[in-house]
Image (cartoon, grey):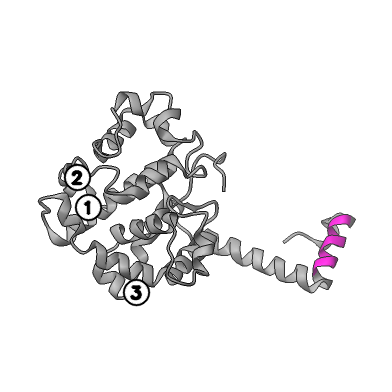
């Protein structure tokens, strides 16, 4: 620890003010606690490219299912790439990328498969930096599918991915405030983090009353329902939704 005599007069006066001002003193303690907590957080856990350790085992099956899913099956992915400005520095991914996605990959929301987006990031890894929110959403989907394959074995068609989707969506809607609060608290603990789906409306969802669900809330709910197992949702376990959180490398992204 530095000797008191080594501080300048201005620094000593600032310390004195913190000691004497209860509000400043509380802020100091809170900031110390926050930084201590941050030191224990594994930031690699929130990389946008993270996939479960067993992904390689199910990669072929996962990609096959991505080749069946289109953008209308998972509207939250499309929204993540088109409208979530805070996710994607370049704006709508279909038009703003250096290699125009819409032209090269013959984009159509009803006909284009999600596997095309995976191919895009493989072909153009430099785009990940500017479209990291979209990239994280894609890997969230891949994580969800490979987790389901890991727990249930082979899945023959995309329809099997949605067998209990309505029931899961009902549970997420019913517990939207609790789930949002858990994600909100996690986001506050992980510095510079954000959700790739529903980031801006997260705090509003905590205070959601009534049964009227907006379009963005519906897509947020759908993302959690798709990524979670029915068993965990029934148990009030929402840890799988935490995969929506990531720390963007591009610091220019809006919060």
Kindly identify the residue that appears in the image at 36 percent across and 43 percent down.
78
Q: Residues within 10 Å of mark 2 (few under 14, many from 20)?
A: some
Q: Are marks 2 and 1 in contact (CB under 8 Å)?
A: yes
Residue 59 - label = 2
Q: Is residue 62 left or right of residue 47?
A: left
What is the distance, in whole Å, between disc 1 and disc 3 at their CAs? 22 Å
Kindly identify the residue that appears in the image at 43 percent across and 24 percent down.
98
What is the distance, in whole Å, between disc 2 and disc 1 at their CAs? 7 Å
Residue 123, quarter of the rendered image: top left
Is tag 2's residue or tag 1's residue first in the polypeptide sequence?
2
Residue 236 - label = 3
Q: Which contiguous range is marked in magenta?
A: 10-18
Tell me if residue 149 can be seen: no
Q: Residues within 10 Å of mark 3 (few under 14, many from 20)?
A: some
In the image, 55 versus 224, the foreground residue is 224
Q: Is residue 242 above or below residue 125?
A: below
Q: Are marks 1 and 3 in contact (CB under 8 Å)?
A: no
Tell me if residue 241 can be seen: yes
**Kind of element beneath mark 3:** loop
Magenta stretch prevailing secondary structure: helix
What is the distance, in whole Å, between disc 3 and disc 2 at their CAs? 29 Å
Q: Is residue 201 above or below residue 179?
A: above
Tell which residue pokes out farthest to the front in this image. 212
Residue 167 - label = none
Residue 146 - label = 1
**Kind of element beneath mark 2:** helix
């Amino acid at each position: 620890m530095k000797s008191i005599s080594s501080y300048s007069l201005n620094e000593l006066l600032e310390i004195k003010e913190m000691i004497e001002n209860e509000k400043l003193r509380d802020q100091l303690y809170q900031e110390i606690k926050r930084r201590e907590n941050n030191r224990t957080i594994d930031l690699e856990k929130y990389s946008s490219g993270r996939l479960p350790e067993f992904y390689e085992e199910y990669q072929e099956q996962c990609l096959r299912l991505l080749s069946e899913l289109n953008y209308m099956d998972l509207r939250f992915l499309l929204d993540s790439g088109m409208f979530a400005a805070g996710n994607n520095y370049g704006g709508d991914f279909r038009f703003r990328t250096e290699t125009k996605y819409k032209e090269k990959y013959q984009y159509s929301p009803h006909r284009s498969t999600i596997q095309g987006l995976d191919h895009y990031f493989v072909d153009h890894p430099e785009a990940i930096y500017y479209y990291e929110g979209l990239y994280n959403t894609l890997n969230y989907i891949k994580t969800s599918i490979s987790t389901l394959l890991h727990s249930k074995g082979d899945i023959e068609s995309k329809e099997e991915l949605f067998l209990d989707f309505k029931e899961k969506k009902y549970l997420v809607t019913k517990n939207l405030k609790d789930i949002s609060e858990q994600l909100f608290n996690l986001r506050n603990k992980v510095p510079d983090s954000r959700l790739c789906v529903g980031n801006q409306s997260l705090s509003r969802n905590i205070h959601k009353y009534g049964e009227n669900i907006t379009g963005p809330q519906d897509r947020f709910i759908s993302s959690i329902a798709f990524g979670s197992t029915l068993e965990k949702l029934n148990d009030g376990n929402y840890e799988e939704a935490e995969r929506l959180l990531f720390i963007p490398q591009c610091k220019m992204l809006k919060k």
